[in-house]
Image (spheres, grey):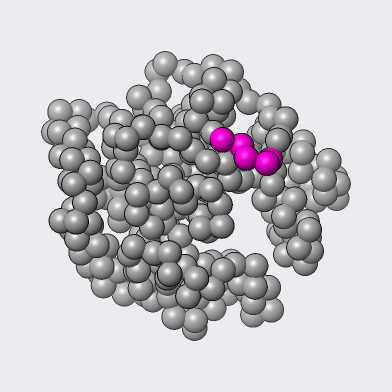
Amino acid sequence: MGEIKLHQDHFIIGLTGNIGTGKSIVRKMLQHLGAYGIDADLLAHQALKPNGPAHDQIIHRYGSSILDTHGAVDRSKLARIVFSNEKALIDLENILHPLIATAAANMIHHARLPIIVIEAIKLLESDLAKTCDSIWVVDAQKQVVLERLSRERGMNNAEIQKRLSHQSTLEKKRQQSDVMIENSGDVYKTWQQVTKAWDQTKQKNQKFTVCIKKTSDLLAFSEDFLITPSSSNYSAVEDIIYTTNLAKSLIGWGAIQMSLTFKKNIHSKVSCG
């Protein structure tokens, strides 16, 4: 992902962890505490849609055989290709990561809340990590991960191990983390860890304390201050996140040069900035 150059009035929590550890529940807990949530996986899914900015590039790279009967990218077919071929996976990341970085930068730019949490499975492998004020890593017991992925995604053990082989180890993540969250099934225990880490960050970091105060003021004086994107309300923010006007000023593309097609207009009616 490209490097995002952000204003100093944001405190950004980078949230990561391997597949099946339950990152999303931790992100939602942070949103409950007052953070603006950005789900990189959701952004990738939206970019792959027929009208999304990655769709044509994906078809050009992997062929029309990955499409379903409606002309949309079949993510399970795409996954079988990229997780069996290292070069194919790198190419996919080179297509998606700049788009996700652009989307995240634009969302942060428009978000009224000063505390941002970005959930991304490849956070530490990308330039996105450089923009974070704090890195939170979610982990879970191996058996819990296997059961979750089998139950919720229908993955067998071979598929799970193949996915994990393309992700950095917990030890590497731990070395770069500021906060570790153990999320093996007891939601209340996970919540206790999240709130404790939130309070400890507040005690240690003056910038975080200032941002919490600003968040409290926003909550006190505005009922409609925020749209946190999800699969159900994505259309409300879609025009904000894929625009070229902010990308050049907020994204440092590094070595990756892409030709991107973005939507041009921002709907003023969307209450995100």
Placement of 235 over or under 72, stated as above or below: above
Taking the image as shown, residue 75 lies to the left or right of residue 167, namely right
> Image point 67% across, 33% down: which residue?
53
Which SS type dominates the magenta stretch? loop
Taking the image as shown, residue 59 lies to the left or right of residue 184, namely right
Q: Which residues are magenta?
A: 252-256
Placement of 215 over or under 122, stated as above or below: above
- Residue 64 visible (yes or no): yes
Placement of 143 over or under 86, stated as above or below: below
> Image point 81% across, 42% down: which residue?
59
> Image point 49% across, 38% down: which residue?
4
> Image point 43% across, 75% down: which residue?
140
Taking the image as shown, residue 161 lies to the left or right of residue 71, namely left
- Residue 195 visible (yes or no): no
Q: Residue furthest bottom?
A: 143
Q: Residue 92 appears at what percent x and percent y? A: 71, 50
Q: Quadrant of the N terminus?
A: top right
Taking the image as shown, residue 272 lies to the left or right of residue 91, namely left
**Is 167 a magenta residue?**
no
